[in-house]
Amino acid sequence: MRRLVPRAVEPNDVESAYADLAGQRAEGRPYVAVNMVASVDGAISVEGRTKAMSSEADRFVFHFLRSLADVILVGAQTVRAENYGPPKVSEDRQAERVARGQAPVPRIAIVSGSLDLDWSSRLFTESPSRPLVLTVSSADASEARQVADVVVAGKDRVDLTAALALLGEQGVGVVLCEGGPTLNGVLAADDLIDELCLTIAPALVGGDVGTGVLGHTHLDDLLPMRVVHAFEDEGDLFLRYRRTAARPADRASRPVGEALAPTDDDTVEVFNDIMADLDYPMIVVTATDGHERSGCLAGFATQVSIHPPRYMVWISKKNHTYKVACRADTFAVHFPASGQHDLAELFGSETGDHVDKFASCEWHEGPEGAVIVDAIPRWFVGRITETFDSGDHVGFLLQPLDGECRPWSGQLGFQEVKGIPPGHRA
Ligand SMILES: NC(=O)c1ccc[n+]([C@@H]2O[C@H](COP(=O)([O-])OP(=O)(O)OC[C@H]3O[C@@H](n4cnc5c(N)ncnc54)[C@H](OP(=O)(O)O)[C@@H]3O)[C@@H](O)[C@H]2O)c1
């Protein structure tokens, strides 16, 4: 368990914490994020509307998420209850979308079996691009076709797996579902929710409590999720969760070595021989939780995606830096130059359990409060977006935010430093 330490953040930090949504992709269908606001006691509306629960900050996140999506998906009852209008995106956001290769404004897609919608409303007459209507073959869609593009999937109920696959074929990458609970429940029942952005409004609503984020849907199994981030603004909690294959606790309690087929000793020896002769770059990783700083020399690290750019660093669970890393939002990843053995020794063979490594080197505070070691010519700061427990090391997936690339004499490689005894044995 860890306490979330309040640290003030800028609006830019909030944006960059959600910004990767635009680049997310899923297999065979668009990536689906659900955005909802709920009261502390789980109500999703007050007298049938969300307005009373939605603060200025919630509306900021609501509109920012819209600006990242290709399609906004919404249930017909929400369109009717909330009197949905055409999607609006500011000119600056439109320019950002176009630069990313998206249409200037996301399309609205309404799910309806009855097609009992007001076709003369502004949603259909003033939307910048024709709305989509996802419906069933048993419905008479002739009126809808005059003002919207109709997607038919299923006979009596919209088959959302099929409907989303059709949207994917049309090039839709990211769908933002804005509810309501009935539609969310249908998505969850088919395990189509990749992430949930949930605002918890600081109020008890009672009485007229709604039906929770997923309505009355019964799920056969838990759908585990992990927390991507949590922000607080004047009592509102902004929680971002992502679907995971297993609950983090389940993963942690299952030693990876036992889950995999045992590897025989000869194979391990061959594997170790191969690894011992490789010459991969050695990096210095620093992390801070705002109170404590830590840093270590690491060799398990590599770029793992080009679009979006992502880098992964694995830290030993025994390392002092690991404890701080678990509380940190960002890492500073430094690439020492060939010959910087003093720094390699400082960060490789001393342990932060016993010495303050930062008392022995010059450093300064960099972007996002990251700890930058002055003498290392190349570094970047990355936001931790995912973690992966791979055994005695845990992988931290990083979204690069900022950095510096000064001239150097080439990288410090594993072969140059493999004689340095580690501060902790992995
Ligand atoms: N707190 C929040 O963030 C939030 C967000 C959104 C909405 N809300 C609130 O939620 C309430 C509305 O939610 P709701 O759960 O009643 O309705 P909903 O999910 O918005 O819409 C349900 C309707 O969507 C259509 N639908 C959904 N899945 C379908 C399927 N598989 N096949 C065919 N049609 C399907 C049906 O439309 P037809 O009836 O046309 O067939 C169904 O009646 C409102 O009070 C609204 O204010 C709150």
Image (tube, grey):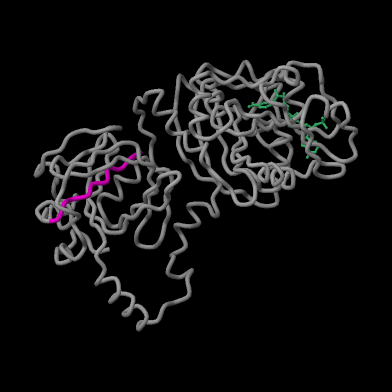
Q: Position of residue 424 (x, y in %)?
A: 22, 60
Tell me: 253 left or right of 148: left
Residue placed most toward the observer, 206 or 264: 264
Tell me: 299 left or right of 68: left
Q: Quadrant of residue 349?
A: bottom left
Tell me: 150 left or right of 11: right
Q: Against 42, is 194 above or below?
A: below
Q: Position of residue 167 (x, y in %)?
A: 69, 41
Q: Is residue 129 magenta?
A: no
Q: Against 366, is 308 above or below?
A: below
State which quarter of the image contains the N terminus.
top left
Quadrant in which ligand 1 is drawn: top right
Q: Position of residue 193 (x, y in %)?
A: 62, 43
Count of numbered badges drawn on the protein: 0
Q: Is residue 38 visible?
A: no
Q: Is residue 227 visible?
A: yes
Q: Is residue 330 magenta?
A: yes
Residue placed most toward the observer, 215 or 266: 266
State which quarter of the image contains the C terminus.
bottom left
Q: Against 37, is 412 above or below?
A: below
Tell me: 417 left or right of 18: left
Residue placed most toward the observer, 103 or 331: 103
Q: Looking at the image, which residue is at 35% across and 46% down?
A: 326
The part of the chain drawn in magenta is: 328-338
Q: Position of residue 210 (x, y in %)?
A: 70, 27
